[in-house]
Image (spheres, rainbow, N blue to C red):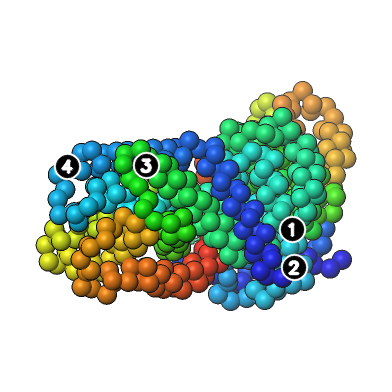
Amino acid sequence: MNTLATTLSDSVVITKRNLIKVRRVPDLIVFATLSPIMFVVLFRYVFGGAIGGLPPGISYAEFLLPGIFAQTVVFGSTITGASLADDLQKGLIDRFRSLPMSRSAVLVGRTVADAGLNVISIAVMALTGLVVGWRINSSLGEALAGFLVLLVFAYAISWLMAVVGLLVRTPEVVNNASFIVIFPLTFIANTFVPLETFPSVLRVFAEWNPVSTVTLASRELFGNVPPGTPVPDVWSLQNPVLYTLVWTAVILAVFVPLSVRLYQRTATR
Amino acid sequence: MSDAIVVEGLVKRFGATTALDGVHLTVAEGSVLGLLGPNGAGKTTVVRILTTLLRADAGRVRVAGLDVVEDADAVRASIGLTGQYAAVDEYLTGLENLEMVGRLYRLGKREARARAGELLERFDLTGAADRPAKTYSGGMRRRLDIAASLIARPRILFLDEPTTGLDPRSRLGMWEFIADLADGGTTILLTTQYLEEADRLADRMVVIDRGRVIARGTADDLKAQVGGQRLEFTVTTAAVLPDVLERLRGMAVDEPQVDEQARRLSLPVSGGAEILAEALQRLDGFTPDILDVGLRRPDLDDVFLALTGHAAEETAGDDDRPAQPAATGGMA
Ligand SMILES: Nc1ncnc2c1ncn2[C@@H]1O[C@H](COP(=O)(O)OP(=O)(O)O)[C@@H](O)[C@H]1O
Ligand SMILES: [Mg+2]
């Protein structure tokens, strides 16, 4: 069998294995579905009334949902790191590495399974969003592109988290560390409030933060940016899809080879 | 017979720690090698290098005739590894675990399933086949782990402390499985801290301590290094000891030891069980004074203590053992 075919078939085996776990561990399903529902509802009704500066002609629900999508899928990607650290701790990586299997299949299978979990999260959030007033005001193709850009960006973050997981080796530490980094990253962005309300330094950070651009990209693709909204004066926000895809490509280009290399050298301690 | 495993001059450092300091060993095809050593001796490091998980800093390793660095993938296809801690996926059932590993060894779907069924049967796990491994006892996980490493019928099997942490009954069961595999022709490298285990399962042994081989050979070779067998008598009163000694002196191959306080006589001898019969014949008339007679061979615990100057297992409680001189060098 050639390498591509073996990588694919091994990756399918590993993806299946990871998805079985999702089915058997209710916590994961809860994390992937209930907490986004809670976020949608809390933000929509608790902060919704207080958040000002929205472009005219748009409800907070419509502004909010793409932001929550972005935050949730980025957090969803941290599961990759925690799960790999867990596999490492439990000796499973040693087992896999002693088998004549593809060197990247464990990582591919992991990231693909976590992308699958993100699909579930987004679907649940979208339905909840529709209930609380979110609407897609674009074509089906654009809407699908909106979901795709979120998932693709999150997929790249998964590979970054794979490197973190293989280096940190303790699932709890991976979780805490990524919380400390990702929480501010998803808040210092246009996810929940318009950037116009930010103090200047934070605003510059937020304008170039890829979480902002992935949010804006999906907002535009869902038709959640009303016509007549002033065009931002920074390049990243003028070209959110392109800017997000550049980040995605760079993250993948760096962290896919890095994590495969780390995987090949790592062993349970 | 050719060698399934050849290890030459293996060196591995972790920062300032030298885990392996020039290990040489060979394992003949179809034989069982016991790699013995206390905690931290370097056993797991050897296994990890031989199974392609770690790279050595120096030395050469050939497994199944292949270089573990250059031909890592081909090596992986011909070995099975059961690591020190059971590496089973807790969320998968026993059957799913085995099927997954089978598929990753490139067995077809149907074959993987059939092999999994066979092995579950053989390792007494059929009843638990459809339960997640999370619910398994320690012994069941170990068995599942070994079953996983056997799924593709590897020619060479590595078992890193396969019975550590098992209760005595599970340990006996595991010994039977391993002995069966060896009988079936699988080459096995087994690490253990238990001398009894090596004595029971291994054809040859390599003893390592602090990353160096300190002895090697068969169990008998190692025992011979510490000294041969002894006839030991305990008598009712120390007063008869000189007479007993007088009668037996001709049988001794070395200087006898007399312990008046313990009313004990220890006589180095050579020969089989008939020695005992001869001794009793010579003592005709003294039998009422003799409390206890025994032909004692040194066991591997003695060997270990003699070679390393410390006991093999911290738990062995060797405080009351007579001090033995540390032997120098191995039989390498
Ligand atoms: N990954 C590692 N990093 C640092 N030190 C290690 C590592 N693996 C093993 N060691 C050290 O190498 C020595 C040998 O360890 P090991 O091979 O696990 O011994 P054993 O299996 O005989 O108990 C020990 O001193 C251990 O602390
Ligand atoms: Mg060990």
**Whole-number angstrom distance, CA of label 1 to CA of label 4:** 58 Å
**Residue A53: % across, % down:** 15, 54
**Whole-number angstrom distance, CA of label 4 to CA of label 2:** 60 Å
Residue at 58% of width from left, 65% of height from top? A104
B251, B176: nearer the viewer: B176
Name the residue carrying label 3: A130
Name the residue carrying label 2: A1
**Label 1 near ligand 2 (CB < 8 Å):** no
Name the residue carrying label 4: A49
Q: Do labels 2 and 3 touch, CB within 8 Å? A: no
Relative to A54, B330 lies left or right: right
Q: Secondary structure at mark 1?
A: loop
- Mark 2: few/some/many CA within 10 Å (<14, 14-19, 20+): few
Q: Are marks 4 and 2 on the same chain?
A: yes
**Mark linked to residue B304:** none
**Whole-number angstrom distance, CA of label 1 to CA of label 2:** 10 Å
Name the residue carrying label 1: B106
